[in-house]
Image (cartoon, helix red, strand yellow):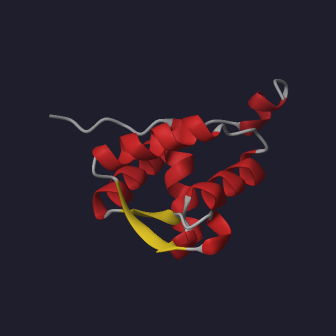
């Protein structure tokens, strides 16, 4: 069975997690995405995507320590798995291949 490609938002979420390293939890991921793509990211869409990626084996999660500032709740931290990194690589390679030979000047008139 051929591997399915990641969706655009899935790629963005996984890349944000990689950039955040050990500090990748819901709020930090959302904040990075909002800053990087200049688009409002709903909490629901983010957590739905995180759950889907985890079910696919592309992410893992772990509970942090409960802290008073969060009303005794713990943060859930995310990490990209080896399988997730392979999926990101496949997606990047596919896009790089498709972009080869595309003249950006032809796209400028649509910007």
Report the residue at 51% width, 43% height from top.
47
- In the image, residue 81 above or below residue 46: below
Q: Position of residue 99 (x, y in %)?
A: 56, 40
Residue, far top: 110
Q: Position of residue 92 (x, y in %)?
A: 47, 50
Q: Position of residue 11 (x, y in %)?
A: 50, 46
Instruction: Say whether residue 75 is visible.
Output: yes
Q: Nearer the viewer, residue 62 or 73?
A: 73
Q: Nearer the viewer, residue 97 or 95?
A: 95
Report the residue at 42% width, 67% height from top.
63
Instruction: Say whether residue 101 is visible.
Output: no
The answer to whether residue 105 is left or right of residue 13 is right
Residue, far left: 1
Report the residue at 63% width, 65% height from top.
70
Report the residue at 28% width, 57% height from top.
83
- In the image, residue 65 above or below residue 18: below
Q: Position of residue 7 (x, y in %)?
A: 47, 35
The N terminus: image quadrant = top left
- In the image, residue 105 above or below residue 80: above
Q: Quadrant of residue 27?
A: bottom right
Q: Nearer the viewer, residue 49 or 76?
A: 76
Q: Nearer the viewer, residue 19 or 52?
A: 52
Counting the numbered discs, the total is 0
The answer to whether residue 41 is left or right of residue 87 is right
The C terminus: image quadrant = top right
């Amino acid at each position: 069975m051929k591997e399915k490609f990641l969706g655009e938002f899935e790629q963005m979420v996984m890349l944000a997690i990689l950039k955040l390293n050990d500090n990748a939890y819901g709020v930090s991921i959302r904040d990075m995405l909002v800053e990087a793509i200049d688009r409002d990211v709903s909490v629901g869409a983010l957590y739905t995507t995180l759950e889907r990626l985890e079910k696919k084996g592309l992410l893992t999660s772990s509970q942090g320590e409960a802290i008073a500032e969060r009303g005794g709740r713990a943060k859930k931290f995310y990490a990209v798995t080896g399988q997730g990194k392979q999926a990101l690589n496949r997606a990047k390679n596919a896009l790089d291949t498709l972009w080869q030979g595309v003249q950006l000047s032809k796209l400028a008139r649509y910007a």
